[in-house]
Image (spheres, grey):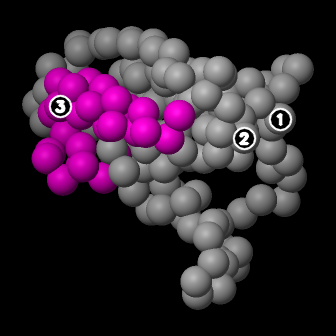
Amino acid sequence: MNQSFFSDEFYQIPAALENGAIVRSLVEHFSTKTGLSESQVSNLQLAVCEAFNNAVEHGLDLDDKQTVVLRLRTSHRKLLIEIEDYGKGVDFHGFGFSGCFPQAGERGRGLQIIAALTDGIEFENLFPSGTRIILMKWLNTKA
């Protein structure tokens, strides 16, 4: 990868679960330009699609009249992917990954999957409502 590579792409995607295919395609197109391996790109697609689905289902209550914002950018040898919705928001107080795995057969493993497939994850509550999740992946920096 050229260390001077910088890119920033922004999309508004209708909040429908079937648009996950669009999200996967956008992530693939963008992240392959950064020098990530095929398996890293595949893992990133899964993580971002899971975050998109969470925004659609939990943030926007499957309201396909709403949109989810997808921003893909590189910054200081890392790939940052932001997914945001302007729905009801989430209370992240006291939220953590350790010790909060659901029982077998239950839903709710999405955030653990996202955390396992990325190098960092941040949550932000938006004003007046909504949520932004920022996924980070370190880029390969061979001289």
Work out whether residue 27 can be spotted.
Answer: no
Mark sitting on residue 54: none
Q: Is residue 46 above or below residue 60?
A: below
Question: Mark 2 belongs to which amino acid?
Answer: Asp
Disc 1 secondary structure class: loop
Mark sitting on residue 32: 3
Q: Is residue 99 above or below residue 27?
A: below
> Is the residue marked by circle 3 packed among few (<14), some (14-19), or many (20+) residues within 10 Å?
few
- How much space separates mark 2 and mark 3, taking CA atoms? 32 Å
Mark sitting earlier along the chain (2/1): 2
Question: Mark 1 belongs to which amino acid?
Answer: Lys
Q: Which residue is mark 1?
A: 88
- How much space separates mark 3 and mark 1, taking CA atoms? 33 Å
Mark sitting earlier along the chain (2/3): 3
Q: Which residue is mark 2?
A: 61
Query: Marks 2 and 1: CB-CB under 8 Å?
Result: yes
Indicate which label's residue lies in the foreground, 2 or 1.
2
Looking at the rendered image, the quarter that the C terminus falls into is: top left
Residue at the image position 72 percent from the left and 41 percent from the top: 61
Q: Nearer the viewer, residue 139 or 132?
A: 132
| The magenta segment | 16-44
Kindly report the secondary structure that dominates the magenta region of the rendered protein: helix
Work out whether residue 41 can be spotted.
Answer: yes
Question: Mark 3 belongs to which amino acid?
Answer: Thr
Q: Is residue 6 left or right of residue 14?
A: left
Q: Position of residue 120 (x, y in %)?
A: 51, 47
